[in-house]
Image: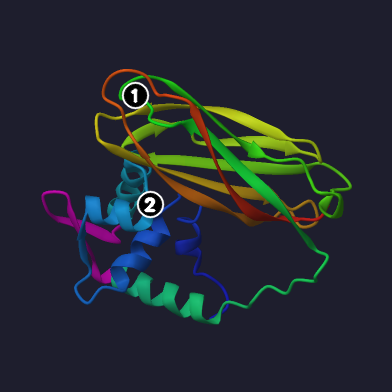
Amino acid sequence: MTELPFRLKTLEPLPGALDIIRYLGKLEEPVADIDTLCDELSLSDRGFSKAIRRLVTKGYVQMVGDQVYRLTDQGRTAAEELAAYDAHAPEETETEDQYVQRKLIVAIPEKPVAKQLTNVFIGFEAADADAELDSDAQMVLRVSAIHGQIDGDEMLDLGNEPAYNTFTLIPDAYTKLRLRVEAYQLNPNDDGIETCGGLYIDIDINNAGDGGDYKAYSTSVKLLHV
């Protein structure tokens, strides 16, 4: 099998839906609660709610207890189809000069305050001399949070200079939150989307006082050379 069945392709635009099927399908007993699924798949509460609602409506998953979900027979079949697709999907070929490395940066207060709006700055460092782009790259920054509310996807036109977007985060009243940042690039050659990379950040939440100084986190991601 080299192509995903059409009925599963319709789930692809909804982040987390196929991952939930994959995860449950790998369990000996395909049952898990909300906390386990969110933690294992790094899904936000909002993202999980959207994905699980679609899966239940389409008959892939059913609720079997308080916040506990199980694959249906249809869901088991879908998990098998996904496993076969993942095992036989053709590997992408890359030439050495097709991609360049770029630093993805996240700046966030050291300990953001619960229930208070906090600005989070997410973007890229300037390009090194050997990684300069010939034209702007159209990037998509996808951001989600566990135990917090944050903006979803935002576009960013990236040249060789530093560039960033400002996201608004409201931490929930917990002791920690997990921030997930993923970078994608629109491919100008085939209208596809390149997965560039990303990072997870576990951050303490302050239930009183202020958020403290900003702290920067970074990782290298792979950009298509344009």
Position of residue 29 measured from the top left corner of the image (x, y, whole percent): 19, 73
Q: Nearer the viewer, residue 24 or 3?
A: 24
User: Do the residues bearing badges 2 and 1 touch, measured as CB atoms within 8 Å?
Assistant: no
Q: Amino acid at mark 2?
A: Ser
Quadrant of res 150:
top left
Report which residue position mark 1 lands on.
Answer: 113
Quadrant of res 169:
top left
Disc 2, SS: loop
Report which residue position mark 2 lands on.
Answer: 42
Q: Nearer the viewer, residue 4 or 162?
A: 162
Please report the bounds of the magenta region as a residue range: 59-74
- Quote the CA–CA distance across marks 2 and 1: 21 Å
User: Residue at image x 30%, y 25%?
Assistant: 114
Q: Amino acid at mark 1?
A: Val
User: Residue at image x 50%, y 76%?
Assistant: 85
Position of residue 117 measured from the top left corner of the image (x, y, whole percent): 41, 20
